[in-house]
Image: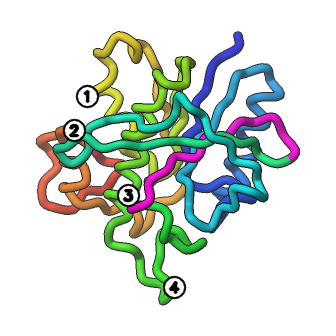
Amino acid sequence: MSLKLFYLTTEISPFASTSHLGDYSVFIPLSLQTKGHDVRTMIPKYGFVSERKYILREVIRLREIPFEFDGQEVITSAKSAFIPKTRVQVYFLENVDWYKSLTNLLYKAKNGRILSDNDARYAYFSKAAIATLPHLFWKPDVLICNGWQSSFVPLIYQQIYDSKDFYGKIKTVLTVHSVDEFCNFSRSAYDKVGVTLPKTIKGDTVNCYEA
């Protein structure tokens, strides 16, 4: 049976890669596509990604997509390209404030310090990715989420989108790539995307895989 699969990741080689995730995010979508599945991927549009080199294209229906974040309506947009030498489509999710200024270290400053707003940055990515779906005119059967960066997606989908007409009956899969200091989020990041944490979780710091 052929499935429609929306593969969410923050790294895809050669656009952006800090670890095995960049290569993994090429191999898995390509492998799934060769098995006959309809696979589309999404990644943040980092400022260092060359639109000219990788032939990123404007998509009119993916401009100025509204959704709620941190208690207010915000706007996102996306551009389209392909993983080089493949037919795997990539959507680049745009937000100047969150992604344009990042270096190719992605989650760290140049001095090696972990960025304190990683959780909010990828909370935004997670909710925005789901919000784009009706504008793609394409409904996936499964949202494939990778690592701590898109660990918000299952909660957001279950609590906010599952009951909406377009979104019903989409499955979510979360792949754990590592368990380390990046997995510790502030409770406020969950507030920004409008989800409620289980009552068993106490304190202001949350391990994303326990949420």
Q: Nearer the viewer, residue 175 or 192?
A: 192
Task: Give the crowd class for mark 1: few <14, some 14-19, many >=20 residues within 10 Å.
Answer: few
For the residue marked with disc 1, what is the amino acid?
Gln
Q: In the picture provided, is 180 more to the left or to the right than 83?
A: left
User: What residue did someone put label 4 on?
Assistant: 110
Q: Position of residue 181 (x, y in %)?
A: 39, 69
Task: Give the crowd class for mark 4: few <14, some 14-19, many >=20 residues within 10 Å.
Answer: few
As helix, strand or loop, the secondary structure at mark 2 comes to loop
Q: Are marks 2 and 1 in contact (CB under 8 Å)?
A: yes
**Looking at the image, is mark 3 or mark 2 earlier in the sequence?**
3
| Numbered marks: total | 4
Q: In the picture provided, is 16 more to the left or to the right than 64?
A: right
Q: Nearer the viewer, residue 109 or 66?
A: 66
60 to 147, vertically: above or below: above
**Residue 195 — which label?**
2
**Looking at the image, is mark 4 or mark 2 earlier in the sequence?**
4
The label nearer to you, 1 versus 3, is 3
Residue range highlighted in magenta: 85-97
Task: Give the crowd class for mark 3: few <14, some 14-19, many >=20 residues within 10 Å.
Answer: some
Quadrant the N terminus occupies? top right
For the residue marked with disc 4, what is the amino acid?
Lys
User: What residue did someone put label 3 on?
Assistant: 121
Instruction: Measure the alpha-carbon separation of dots 2 and 1.
Output: 6 Å
Quadrant the C terminus occupies? top left
Q: Position of residue 210 (x, y in %)?
A: 31, 47
For the residue marked with disc 3, what is the amino acid?
Arg
